[in-house]
Amino acid sequence: MRTVISGGTIVTAADTYRADVLIDGERIAAIGTDLARDGDRIVDATGKLVMPGGIDVHTHLDMPFGGTTSCDDFTTGHLAALHGGTTMHIDFAQQPKGGSLRDGLETWNEKANGRAVMDYGFHMIITDARPEVIEELDWLVEQGVPSFKLFLAYPGVFMVDDDTLFAVMERAAGNGGLVMMHCENGQVIDTLVQRAISEGNTSPGWHYRTRPSTLEGESTERAIALAKVAGSPLYIVHVTCSEAVEAIARAREDGQRVWGESCIQYFHLTQDDLDRPGFEGAKFVCSPPLRTEADQARLWEAIRRDELEVISTDHCPFRFEDQKTLGADDFRAIPNGMPVIEERMSLLSTDVHDGHLSWNRLVEVASTNPAKLFGCYPQKGAIAPGSDADIVVWDADVEYTWTADRIHSAVDYTNFEGTTVRGAATHVFSRGELLIEHGEATDAATPGRGKFVHRRTFEHGRPGEYLGPKTTTLQEIHA
Ligand SMILES: [Zn+2]
């Protein structure tokens, strides 16, 4: 089957131009003018943008947390993503405490097998880096999982000490892995949390009051310093505040191989949302917490200056009715996380209209940079001959309002209820298959069609440089 997307404006991280795209099977075969006669099927994209599908490199589908499990599995989460214009994600597999990395990968493969609708990859959360686990990191890279996540938050659950972190960093320095860090000072946060509870402060607003941005900044600086000594590249996940941005900006200025990600909700929501009347603030509990408008302004500045390179979601949905309410009397028991996988691209599109970034920069931070940093470019994140045909036809002008009824996630609310956005996916292709047509899922959008993406290591250049997967061409990727 040959499909031609005709008459649209192609937007990549670098260029904006009018051309047709010819898809042959799973890949892009040609880009040119007047290709329509070559297609068995024509999708008319006149007046629309044609972009690489969104890549969300920070999600938690079907993840156990705080005595419950995030409510989207690899089918509902994928359908939500696809409706929103995202065609690939990288989820976090997790090493069981005391277990091996292989155990963790097998468990997450099981979650995705038979359920995935779009393509996906995994990072690995390291909870317990015994010497044999450090050895196992090389095996993990060979499995196509060249990114390891560690936490400086959540003592007793995920938090690692500095020597564990350092050991993983040193291994990553030698095996092409990328260390990803959740930076918040978990121990001091615990002290503040205990004090709040002992003083009778139990409402959702105390979640942000006990996780001050200074502790995110401190922890970010510490991770950067350790990576510098270890000689490893470092990717800071979900940066929320000025202090953390400043630490990353300084390190990049010095030429250290540090990259930063933020998530779209930190640009659109603030800590005031946690103080909404009643228990509604629980819907906005995630870690690190939402911050202030001044932090939002600094995040946008960081996107403009290339101090942050990725905007993802940290999608981790818990139903309000029976999951968020676990913390009705105690904010510590509110499962941390928000559903954002579907809304991300529409919010970014609105941000383009509002002058915060260009269409090219949208593609860069939401698709191309994620693919490059995580070793699947130019298979993903590109509109180029030979690349997978993961393509979104985007109506940049349609206006609508997010409501809980509109989203496709299994969750029962949206954090953007009543928010009017501008831009929606009309057609979404995944490896050449049309999965969303005029905004609706097609019969092709079936569980089990999505594939695991075996990711490559990349040459760790200086900040801002991209040297590519190690001597890899598209032919080799597809071989
Ligand atoms: Zn996360």
Image (cartoon, helix red, strand yellow):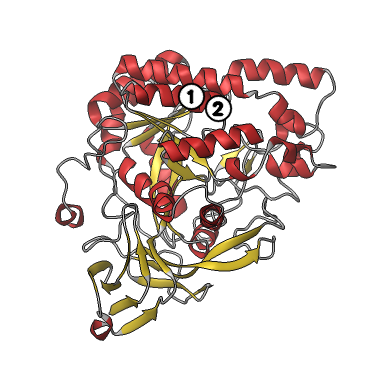
Residue 293 position, x and y percent, is 65, 36
**Residue 398 visible somewhere in the drawing:** yes
Direction from residue 56 to residue 36 in the image, left or right: left
Q: Are marks 1 and 2 in contact (CB under 8 Å)?
A: yes
Residue 455 position, x and y percent, is 29, 46
Residue 152 position, x and y percent, is 51, 22
The residue positioned 52% from the left and 47% from the top of the image is 356
The residue positioned 59% from the left and 63% from the top of the image is 408
Helix, strand or loop at disc 1? Answer: helix
Helix, strand or loop at disc 2? Answer: helix
Q: Nearer the viewer, residue 171 or 156?
A: 171
Find residue 242 and name its label: 2
**Image height check: is 174 above or below 32?**
above
Q: How far apart are marks 1 and 2 (CA)?
A: 6 Å
Q: Which of 75 and 237 is in front in this view?
A: 237
The residue wearing badge 1 is 246
Disc 1 C-beta below 8 A from ligand 1: no
**Label 1 amino acid?**
Glu
Which image quarter: residue 203? Answer: top right
- State the quadrant of the N terminus: bottom left
Direction from residue 232 to residue 122 in the image, left or right: right
**Image height check: is 426 above or below 459?**
below
**Image height check: is 456 above or below 173?**
below
**Label 2 amino acid?**
Ser
Residue 401 position, x and y percent, is 67, 63
